[in-house]
Structures are given as C-alpha cells and as structure tokens.
Amino acid sequence: MAPGTYAGGFYVKGVHGTERAPVVIEARDPKDPPLIQGGDVSFHVSGCRYIILRNLRIDGQRGNGINVDHAGIDDTPGHFVTLENLTVSNVGPVGNHDAIKVSQ
C-alpha cells in the first residue's frame, strides 16, 4: 500500500497463499506506512491461510482494529496469519473492542 490515509473496512475472505508464496498486504515504504482510519474494523481477515499484514498504522475503529476469524465455519479456521510491525490505536468507545481480535 502506498503512503496515505485509507478508510477502514477491508474484508478479506477465503484468500489462501502458500508457505512459499503468502499473500502480503504491507506498506510500500515501511518508513512512511499507510494509515487505515475509521470504520468498524480496519481489516477483517476471515477463513484465510498464509496472509501477512505488515508495516501498517491502524487508528480509530469503532469495533476491532483487526479481526481474524474462521468465516463462521468451524472447519475453515484461519491458519498462518502473520501480523508484523503494526501500530493499532484508539479502538472502540468502551466495552469489548479489541486492537487485535483472533477467534478460531
């Protein structure tokens, strides 16, 4: 992702990389990472395998900063989802709102 500010709400479902060729979502320039701002969630990664989120800034989501889950199907859990060098801030008003939520 290029530097700049992006609206939250990215939904990635059923995307599968491999061990040798993961799907990578990352800053084009790690010294100037993009900001994913607002929305209910910045990234919802659902039922995916071999996904990497790297060098991103996440701010101001109403629900969860990042949500990783099994897409509501118990036999399709997310596997090998890697989160690297992320900054997550100002998530949720009060209550059960997580910077990073992982449920399998």
Image: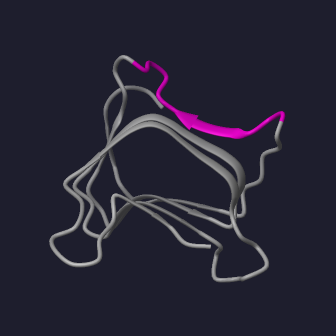
Residue furthest left as drawn: 93
Residue 77: where, in percent of width, then height?
A: 71, 70
Q: Left or right: where does residue 15 sit relative to residue 88?
A: right
Residue 21: where, in percent of width, then height?
A: 80, 35
Quarter of the image with the C terminus is bottom right
Closer to the camera in the image, 93 or 29: 93
Q: Residue at x 21, y 78 (%)?
A: 95
> How would you classify the magenta stretch by its main secondary structure?
loop
Q: Is residue 73 one of those drawn in magenta?
A: no
Q: Left or right: where does residue 7 sit relative to residue 81?
A: left
| Number of numbered discs visible in the structure rendering | 0
Q: Is 54 rendered above or below residue 62?
A: above
Closer to the camera in the image, 75 or 14: 75
Q: Left or right: where does residue 92 sit relative to residue 47?
A: left
Q: Tell me the colour scheme of the image.
A: one colour
Q: Is 84 rendered above or below residue 99?
A: above
Q: Residue at x 72, y 82 (%)?
A: 74
Residue 41: where, in percent of width, then height?
A: 37, 63
Which image quadrant is residue 56 in?
top left
Residue 96: where, in percent of width, then height?
A: 29, 77
Residue furthest bottom as drawn: 73
Q: Residue at x 74, y 39 (%)?
A: 22
Magenta span covers which residues? 20-30
Q: Residue at x 65, y 73 (%)?
A: 70
Q: Is 56 rendered above or below residue 17?
A: above
